[in-house]
Image: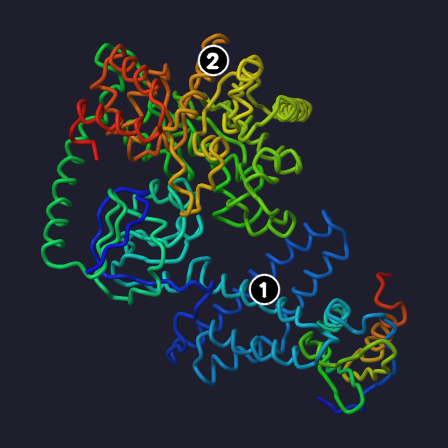
Amino acid sequence: MTAQNPLSRDVTVMLENGLHMVPCSRIAELVREFPGTVSIRHDEKSVDAKSIFDLLTLRAPFGTILTLEASGQGAAHLVDGLAALFERNFEPE
Amino acid sequence: MHTKPGIAVSSGVAIGPAFVLGAEDFRIPQRFVSMGAVDAEIVRFRCAVENVCREIAENEKQASEQLGKQFGAIFAAHQQMARDPKLQGEVEALIRDKNYAPEFALSRVLGLYAQKLQNLGDLYKADRAIDLYDLEKRLLRHLLGERREELVHLTAPVIVLAHDLTPSETASLPRNYVLGFATEVGGYTSHTAILAGALEIPAVVGVGDIVANVSGGDLVILDGYHGRVIVDPDEETIAAYRDSEQRARSVAQRRVSFRSLVSETKDRARVWLMGNIEFPAEAQHCRDLGADGIGLYRTEFLYLESNREQSEDEHFEAYRKVVSAFPDQPVVIRTLDLGSDKMPATLSPFYPEGANPELGLRSIRLSLTDLTRFKTQLRAILRVALLGDVRVMFPLISSLIELRQAKSTLNDVMEDLEEQGIAFSRSIQVGMMVEVPSVPLLAEDFAREVDFFSIGTNDLIQYTLAVDRSNPAVAKFYNSADPAILKMIQMVVAAGRKHDVPVTVCGQMSSDPKFVPLLVGLGLRQLSVTPHVIPELKEVVRSLTIPQAESIAEQATKLELARDVETFLRGELNKLCPDLAT
C-alpha cells in the first residue's frame, strides 16, 4: 500500500444540538464501506469516523469547525460526500 | 429448617438443591473461556451482533412507519453502534488476548464507553448511557439465547428460586434440569403460573423474600400442592415428603386409566373437558390426556416466545399443528390477548404502559388499534378453519360496539380472501370471552350476536372484585368462590340457554376439582382446563349425577361468604372423591 497525504477539508457544525447521536450515526453509515482511513479532527483530537462511539467523544456543539481527513482510493469522493452531509445539515437528500 | 408459605400454582413435590437467580436482568455466567474455545466464542459474538442488527432493523422499520422517520433514526443510530468496528475490535481483542467470555468482554467495553460519554458533560446527557445499556441488553440476550444466562449452564437438577420469572423465561426453562421453581412475587393466575401448570413443573409463587436468604446449593423442598418452600429440611420432613411423593405417583398411575373413558356423569350426561394451551406442541399432549378438543388456544404466546412479528404463514403453521391433533373436535383459537403483562419486547416501545395496564390498551383493544396485525391473524384462522372444527374467539370484549368492530374486521378479511381467490371457511363459529363485568350484565344482548361464550374467570374475578391478581398483598381477596362470581356465571348461563348459545368456563376456576360439581350443577357442560388436570376432573365428573350437582349448586349459591362456599365445596368433593380433596 502506498502512503498518501490525506485529503482534508474543514466543515462547520450547524446543528442546533451539536453533533449528537443521530448525525454521528449518519457519518459512520456513510463512511463504513470506505476501504481507506477516514478521521475527523477537532483541535488536537482526531477520531475514527467509522466508529460512532469515537465520533460521540468529539464534543462538537453548534459552530464547531471540524477537519475531515481521508486517505486511500476514492478519498476525494468520500470527503465530498461527507462535506455535503454537513452542508445540508444532515437532512436527507 | 424454615418454611416459607406461598401460593401453590402447579402441583407436585420437588426435592433438590437451590439455584438462586439474581434480581438483576443479566448476570454474566462465566468470565473466562478456555484458549481452545476462543475462535468459536468470537464466532458466537459475531452471530449475536448480526442477530441484534436484524432485530434493530425491524424496530427501525416499525418505528419509521408507525411513529415517523425521526424515531426510526434513533434505531438507525443503535444499528451503527452495534456495527461499530471499534467496539467489535476491542471486544474480540479481549476474547482473543485475555480469554474473556464474550459477555464479559462486551460489558467491560460498553461500560468504559458509557463512562467516557458521561464524563463529556451535559452536551451528551447521561441518556446516551441508556442507549448503551439497551444495546448491551440486546447483545447479552442474544449471546445468552433469550434465557437467563445462569439457566443455560445448568448441568444438574435444581430448584430455581427467583424474584420473578417472565412468561417467556418460564417457557424456556430447561425442563430436564429444573425440578421446580419458586418466585418471590406473582399470583395464582399470573401467566407464569399458568405456564408452570402447562409445563407440569411444580411451582410456588408469592413467597416473599427468599432470594437473599437462601444460598445456592441449600437443600430445598418445593411443595406445589400446599404452596410451601422448605429450606434446609430435617431428616423427618424429607422422609415424609419422599413418602407422599410415592403415594402421589401411584394415584397418578391409577388415573391414567381414565384417559380412554368418556367424560360423562353417572347418569350419562356428557361434560366436555377441553384443554387450554399456549403452544402448538401441547395439543398432542392434550389428546394423550383424553381431552375433548382445545377450548382455549392462547395465540399470544407465539409472540412472547419469539419476540418478533409473526407472518400469516407462521400463524397458519402453528394453528395447523393444533388442528391436526384434533381434526374432528373443536379447536377454539383466541385472537391475540397481548398487553398488560403479555407485551412482547418488539411492541413495548410503541405502547407505553399506563398507570394501570390491566385497564389500558390490551387484548382486543390492541388488536383493533393495529388492524394490520389483527387481520394477518384472522386470515390465518379463516384459512386453517378448512381443516377442522376451528372456532374464533375475541378476548376482553367489554361493549357491543367492540364486538361489532371485531366481527366487521373478520368480515372484511373474508372479503379480501374471497377477492384474492384464497380458500377459507365462511361458516366459522364466532365467539367471545366473558371477562368484563359489563358482559354478564348485558349477557342477553351479547348472546344475540355470538355463536358461543367462554367465561374467562381470571379476568372476570379481577375486574369484578377489583383485585390485582399478581399482588400478594391483595391476592387473598381474589376468590373464585365469591358469590358475586357465581351470580355472574348464572347470568351468562341463563342468557346462553335462552338464546341457544353454548357456554364454556375456561379460567383457572374450572381446573380446580372442587368447582367442577358446582359448575356442572349451574348448567355448564363444557369446561376448558389446564391439560394435566383433565384425568382428575374426569374422575370427578364420573363420580357425579346431575341431581347431585344441581343440589350442590343450589346450596352453594345460597351461601353469603366466599370462605363458606369454598369450605362447602371442599367438603362435597371430599365425599365424592376423597383422593382429590386437599
**Residue B579: where, in percent of width, then height?**
16, 31
* B151 relative to B569, above or below: below
**Callout 2 and callout 1 share a chain:** yes
As helix, strand or loop, the secondary structure at mark 1 comes to helix
Looking at the image, the residue that sits furthest to the front is B560
Camera-near label (2 vs 1) is: 2
**Residue B176: where, in percent of width, then height?**
28, 53
Q: In terms of sequence position, does the residue under pointer 2 or pointer 1 come before the other?
A: 1
Q: Dot 1 surroundings within 10 Å: few (below 14), some, or many (20 or more)?
A: few
Using the numbered discs, state the Cα–Cα distance from disc 2 to disc 1 in whole angstroms.
50 Å
At horizontal 53% and vertical 37% (from top left) the residue drawn is B337
Which residue is nearer to you in this view: B137 or A10?
A: B137
Q: Which mark is residue B496?
A: 2
* B483 relative to B175, above or below: above
> Three-letter amino acid code at disc 1?
Asp
**Residue B194: where, in percent of width, then height?**
38, 41
Horizontal arrangement in the rendering, residue B223 relative to residue B184 (left or right): left
> Three-letter amino acid code at disc 2?
Gly
Residue B519 figure quarter:
top left
Which residue is nearer to you in this view: A76 or B186?
A: B186
What chain does badge 2 belong to?
Answer: B
At horizontal 48% and vertical 65% (from top left) the residue drawn is B143
Horizontal arrangement in the rendering, residue B389 relative to residue A16 (left or right): left
At horizontal 49% and vertical 23% (from top left) the residue drawn is B391
- What residue is shown with label 1? B134
Looking at the image, the residue that sits furthest to the right is A87
In the rendered image, the quadrant that contains the N terminus of chain B is: bottom left
In the rendered image, the quadrant that contains the C terminus of chain B is: top left
Q: Dot 2 surroundings within 10 Å: few (below 14), some, or many (20 or more)?
A: many
Residue B130 figure quarter:
bottom right
As helix, strand or loop, the secondary structure at mark 2 comes to helix
**Residue B169: where, in percent of width, then height?**
42, 53
